[in-house]
Image (cartoon, grey):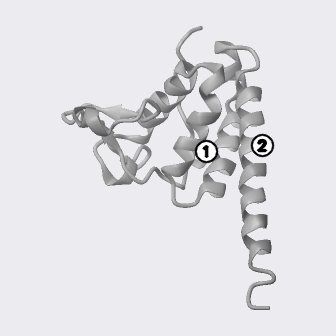
Amino acid sequence: MGKLRLRISEDSRFKEEIKKLFQNNEKSDLNKYDIAYPSNQRCQVTERSPGVNSSHICKDCYYRDFSEKMEDIRKTKRKEFVEYQMLLRNDQEKWLDEFEELLVDYENQFDRADYSFAREYKEIIEDVRKELRGQETSKNSSGLFDGL
């Protein structure tokens, strides 16, 4: 499978950014699903490709590495990857929506690397969304009879 080289248009970028950008020298704190950069990496941060969380890592590099990480994850671990990445965002539902949009917008590029690649991730997003909504429903209904 060939590595993806996505060039993400400005309107396709995650607005729900990652809370923390990891550096390779933080190995003890790294999870296998983290996208990490050497502490000395500096990108060409521009208005078109701003830094992620005001860092020196541009969004083009982040998305390239994010898509490569998506590819590197075994099929059986992709749901864990999505759930972990979701935890790194403040608004998890919004991030799932943006991630799904990214998959739809770039489906042809993803599927060149592995036919059905995008579809598999979209199915995972749907499963995770259902689980999130189920958790919200149980939280809301658990307090229904409190205080009676």
Q: Amino acid at mark 1?
A: Ser
Which one is nearer the viewer's eye here, 143 or 21?
143
Q: As drawn, which residue projects farthest toward the left?
A: 40
Residue 74 seen in this snapshot: yes
Which one is nearer the viewer's eye here, 57 or 44?
57
- Residue at (66% x, 48% y) in the render: 96
What residue is shown with label 1? 12
Dot 2 or dot 1, earlier in sequence:
1
The quarter of the image holding the C terminus is bottom right
- Residue at (71% x, 55% y) in the render: 132
Q: Is residue 145 above or below residue 138?
A: below
Q: Residue 26 in the image: x percent, y percent?
A: 25, 37
Q: Amino acid at mark 2?
A: Glu
- Residue at (28% x, 44% y) in the render: 56
Asked whether the beta carbons under mark 2 and mark 1 sit within 8 Å of each other, the answer is: no
Q: Between tags 2 and 1, which lies in front?
A: 2
Q: Residue 77 in the image: x percent, y percent?
A: 60, 26
133 sits left or right of 59 in the view: right
The quarter of the image holding the N terminus is top right
Q: In the figure, residue 102 lies in which quadrant?
A: top right
Q: Residue 125 in the image: x percent, y percent?
A: 72, 41
Q: Is residue 51 above or below residue 67?
A: below
Q: Is residue 73 above or below residue 11?
A: above
Q: Is residue 4 above or below residue 133?
A: above
What residue is shown with label 2? 126
- Residue at (76% x, 58% y) in the render: 133
Which one is nearer the viewer's eye here, 87 or 14?
87
Q: Residue 143 in the image: x percent, y percent?
A: 74, 79
Around disc 1, counting alpha carbons within 10 Å, would you say few (fewer than 14), some (14 to 19), or many (20 or more)?
some
Say what secondary structure mark 2 lies in: helix
Residue 10 seen in this snapshot: no
